[in-house]
Amino acid sequence: MQLIIYEASLPGLFRLILILTVVYAVYKIITRLIVPALMKKYIKDFQQRFTEQNQYQRNSPVQKKEGEVSITFVDKDKNKAHNPDDGEYVDYEEIK
């Protein structure tokens, strides 16, 4: 087996600097062109999902004017009514 030994040389150093410069330039081009395009696509998809989820709010038939007040009555007795599916009512006494 033959042992290969490399010596440091000035042309080798220049070649290393050139390779590192090219890699850095390619990295900068990728980050300036591709990353913003990916971010725009991500934001566009997010906006589309948001508008689809909130579509019903824009299509609501009742549009109120600014300053208009509406009162919705909620029957308290209806909310307290016992539903037989709720289970058995158990009266308890607090022990101190």
Image (cartoon, grey):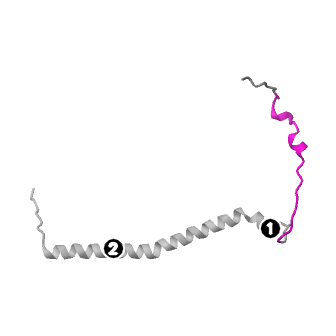
Q: Residue furthest top?
A: 95
**Magenta stretch mostly in which secondary structure?**
loop
Three-letter code for the amino acid on which mark 2 is drawn: Tyr
* Quarter where residue 77 is shown: top right
Question: From the viewer's perspective, is residue 51 above or below residue 21?
Answer: above
Determine whether, in the image, residue 8 is placed left or right of residue 15.
Answer: left
Q: Residue at x 88, y 50 (%)?
A: 74
Which residue is the site of mark 1? 59
Q: Quadrant of the C terminus?
A: top right
* Magenta span of residues: 66-89
The local crowd at label 2, few if under 14, some if 14 to 19, many if 20 or more residues have their Cα within 10 Å, is few
- Mark nearer the N terminus (2 vs 1): 2
Question: From the viewer's perspective, is residue 46 above or below residue 33?
Answer: above
* Quarter where residue 21 is shown: bottom left
Is residue 38 on the magenta stretch?
Answer: no
Q: Residue at x 12, y 73 (%)?
A: 9
Give the percent coordinates (x, y) of residue 32.
44, 76
Relative to the observer, which residue lies in front, 37 or 91? Answer: 91
Give the percent coordinates (x, y) of residue 10.
14, 75
Question: From the viewer's perspective, is residue 81 above or below residue 39?
Answer: above
Determine whether, in the image, residue 35 is placed left or right of residue 66.
Answer: left
Q: Residue at x 40, y 76 (%)?
A: 29
Answer whether labels 2 and 1 touch (C-beta < 8 Å). Answer: no
Give the percent coordinates (x, y) of residue 83.
86, 36
Three-letter code for the amino acid on which mark 1 is drawn: Asn
Q: Residue at x 60, y 70 (%)?
A: 44
Which numbered disc covers residue 24? 2
Give the percent coordinates (x, y) of residue 58.
77, 68
Distance between mark 2 and mark 1 Cα atoms: 51 Å
* Quarter where residue 71 is shown: bottom right
Secondary structure state at the residue bearing disc 2: helix
